Image (cartoon, rainbow, N blue to C red):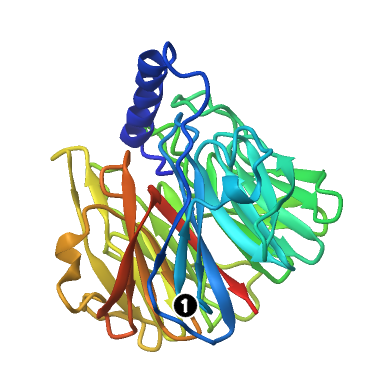
Amino acid sequence: MKTTASRIASLLLAAVLSTIIFSSCRTEPEVVPSSSVNVGDRQLGKYRGFYLLNEGNMGSNKCTLDYYDYEEGIYYRNIYAERNPSVVMELGDVGNDMAVYDGRLYIVVNCSHKVEVLDARTAVRIGQVDIPNCRFIKFVGDKAYVSSYVGPVEIGANSPKGAIYEFDLATLRVTRTCTVGYQPEQMAVVDGKIYVANSGGYNPADYDRTVSVVDIASMTQLTQIEVGINLYGVQLDSWGRMWVSSRGDYKGVESCLYLLEKQEGDDYYKPVGKYDTPVSAMAIDGSELYYLADAWSEITMAATHGYGILDLRTLQLTGANFITDGTEAAIKQPYGLAVNDDNGDIFVMDAKNYVSSGTLYCFDHYGVRKWSVTTGDIPRAITFVPR
């Protein structure tokens, strides 16, 4: 879920209107039937397949889960209800992040304030962890760490600081918390520390501009590193460098990408470079950082889209579009991005108009479209399932 002031406001309005319009004629959430399509792209690499999480519009309770089986070459749409028929509200409201770890699939459901835990092979539900306004998840040993806005989903200067929640993977119980900056987003784990990007997205008049550093052993915030306003994405490359994206203020301050490094003798990472390109999503495969250059302007009230590559060997933007066959003309709203590190396939998730079915596009390493398939509403994230 994007956390711009305009995006949140429009989603909240849509949720209210939907409640008013449909409350008199529908008492249960709409159930989207499961379906499958034979894509035919069978592979016998290191992954059995991948899950795709569909965010679903806020307030609609339409977060859904899809699965692509590499062995069969079949894409299965909306499998959660079929695998878990006794779960009344299904996955819930606004799927935000997802990861496979030690045989389990963890799904962060933002506005339902929970992390769903499933068996990674069967997608059968194991349990849930209750965490308020949860955002992203990472793992260390037998613990998981989840970034949380803590407060309710609403814009305002009085929103509380966010936190990192730790929970035990065996008991699925929250064990510790640590307060960080405002509206924390993505995280990276390095040398026993969690680096989390603080956005401050609920207070657009005064965005946060820091990365919090949390010591895992003591579960305390060690410091905050000033980077740039409205931070969001965090990725580590093979050289141990950290990449942090800023979404700007959607007016005069443009979205950009920051490079952070930790030199010999340094206690923490620090900013050493800045790239003046919008970065709404990014994925690293070896020596290439792929990114969606999607940016919204509250001045023009319009979005611009782009698809770029940063060469991690030279630390230079290549200027190349990673889609090379013209398919970008068919993509309405690029939203999610993933790369299969086994074969180099690039996946772009198209949210279209945010209220109807999206599309998943699969490109080969050269940017040529291999196939595409209809997804649920607002396709958001992909996680691969090891064999």
Work out whether residue 9 can be spotted. yes
Q: Answer whether residue 272 is visible to the viewer in this image.
A: no
Q: Percent position (x, y) of residue 15? A: 40, 25
Q: Residue at x 19, y 69 (%)?
A: 327
Name the quarter where the C terminus is drawn.
Answer: bottom right
Residue most extreme to the right: 171
Amino acid type at image mark 1: Asn
Q: In this view, does 52 lie to the left or right of 144?
A: left
Q: Where is residue 168 in the image (x, y as percent from the top left)?
A: 82, 53
Is 328 placed left or right of 23 in the picture?
left
Q: Quick check: 171 above or below 87?
A: below
Residue at 52% in and 45% down: 95
209 or 27: which is nearer to us?
27
Q: Is disc 1 placed on a helix, strand or loop?
A: loop
The image quadrant that residue 6 belongs to is top left
Locate residue 296, reporting x and y percent: 24, 46
Q: In which quarter of the image is the N terminus?
A: top left
Instruction: Place residue 87 in its image quadrant.
Output: top right
- Crowdedness of circle 1 by 10 Å Cα count: few (<14), some, many (20+)? some
The correct choice, above or below, for 118 with respect to 140 in the image is: above
Between residues 311 and 261, which one lies in front from this camera angle?
311
Quadrant of the rendered structure where residue 8 is? top left
Q: Give percent across and percent down for residue 304.
A: 18, 54
Residue for badge 1 = 340
As drawn, which residue projects farthest toward the top? 24
Residue 290 in the figure: left or right of residue 179: left
